[in-house]
Image: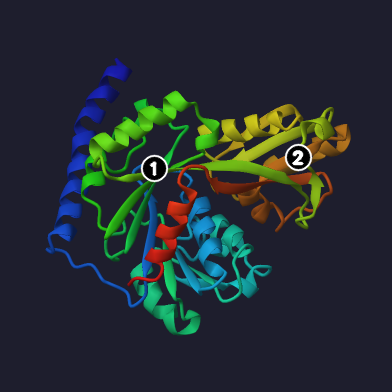
Amino acid sequence: MKQFLWSLVFAVLNPLVDNIYRIRRKLYLYGSKHSVAFAVPVISVGSLAIGGSGKTPLALFLAKMLGKERRVMILSRGHKGKLENSHGVLMAGDRFQADPALYGDEPTMMARHLYAGSSIVVGKRRLHNFYRYFSKCKPQVVILDDGFQHLKIRRDLDIIAFDALLPLSQYKMFPSGQLREGPWALSNVAGEVAVAVITRANLASEEKLSALESYIHRHASESIKIFRVGYYATALFDQYYEKIYSTLPSENQGTKVIALTATAPFSAKVFFQMLESLGFTLVEKITLPDHFAFKGSEFSKVLKRAQQEDLKIVVTEKDIVKINRRYFDERILFLGIELKVITGENEFNELILNSSLSG
């Protein structure tokens, strides 16, 4: 009976949420609601789905690509940070002073990797924050993190991320599925150019990738460009970002670890699988809520066990920026990840560079 009642609720909520997003997008596309064009190029990285689709790692990947020669400003909401409802800026030189409790874990993580002259501006009022910090940061290109639904800002390029590991059965409107905006939005994009990027493509089967590409073409157009991006482990690092373990399974055999991450369950599963593929023995797998603050006793208990049993604790880089504010121990490590374009790399790079010069 309870399941039947929930199905009735979802039957009402799904089309309601879908229609709200439809109307909102149409109002912007046809000019009834005003969007603002910046004086510099804007590249949006977003998604149809709620939660992790690899948007932030992809935004950082672009910032590093462009930041070698241009001043990049990343506009981020700063989710779960105290400045989310206010505003703040992290310059590349401020990365060691960044507090994830203020700026959010993802901006704090990204700040460490920025080239000199680049910046991350946090706060949900991203249009206002751009103007607030423009004179200080003097950006030459803006990356709008999680920007597909942020229609107040015009963009030269819309990059729409699709997680290769999210089951197609979940491509339904929330709360029945994981979508916050329906697939019809793929044919109603706000950018001058739109491309799809399938993230974590190296971890999915060719059958799954082909099915996802067919889904994208079916709802967008046959002409939309689709690129595949892979996520690869680089090494295990300590809290000082010094390399401790390589990615060679033969060198890691017999090393017992507690794998812990604060992320969505299906992302945690991938994290655990990556560690096992590197030869580590996982004596325990712990998944905490996304953006977990590591303030309570949960992590202290895990660390105590690691000390007593001579175990390593392996987390993600997004986790380590919060753990570093409260704990330091040689047993605490994080898994480094790098992104690589695995289909159409030259075309993708050219598209990004051309978009960063328009505006």
Q: How is the image coloured?
A: rainbow
Front in this rendered view, residue 49 or 297:
49
Cα separation between marks 1 and 2: 28 Å
Residue 270 x/y as whole percent: 58, 33
Residue 333, x across and y down, in percent: 75, 46
Q: Is residue 146 left or right of residue 193?
A: right
From this viewpoint, which residue is outermost toward the bottom?
Answer: 135
Dot 2: element = strand
Q: Tell me the tag on residue 132.
A: none
The amino acid sitting under disc 1 is Ile
Instruction: Pick out the residue farthest to the front.
Output: 346
Quarter of the rendering containing residue 94: bottom right
Structural crowding at the residue carrying mark 1, measured as other residues with C-alpha within 10 Å and reported as few (<14), some (14–19) or many (≥20): few
Residue highlighted by disc 2: 313
Question: Disc 2 residue type?
Answer: Ile
**At numbered mark 1, what does the secondary structure look like: helix, strand or loop?**
loop
Please tell me which residue is depicted at 28% across the width and 37% down the height of the picture: 217
Specify whether residue 85 is in view.
no
Q: Residue at x 44, y 85 (%)?
A: 135
| Quarter of the figure with residue 241 | bottom right
Q: Quadrant of the C terminus?
A: bottom left
Please state the horizontal and vertical placement of residue 180, each as a whole percent of the image: 31, 43
Q: Which mark is residue 50?
A: 1
Image height of 341 relative to 75, above or below: above
Q: Residue at x 82, y 47 (%)?
A: 244
- In the picture, measured across the screen, residue 95 lies left or right of residue 133, that is right
Which mark is first along the chain, 2 or 1? Answer: 1
Number of numbered discs visible in the structure rendering: 2
Residue lying at the far top of the rendered structure? 1
Is residue 344 visible to us here? yes
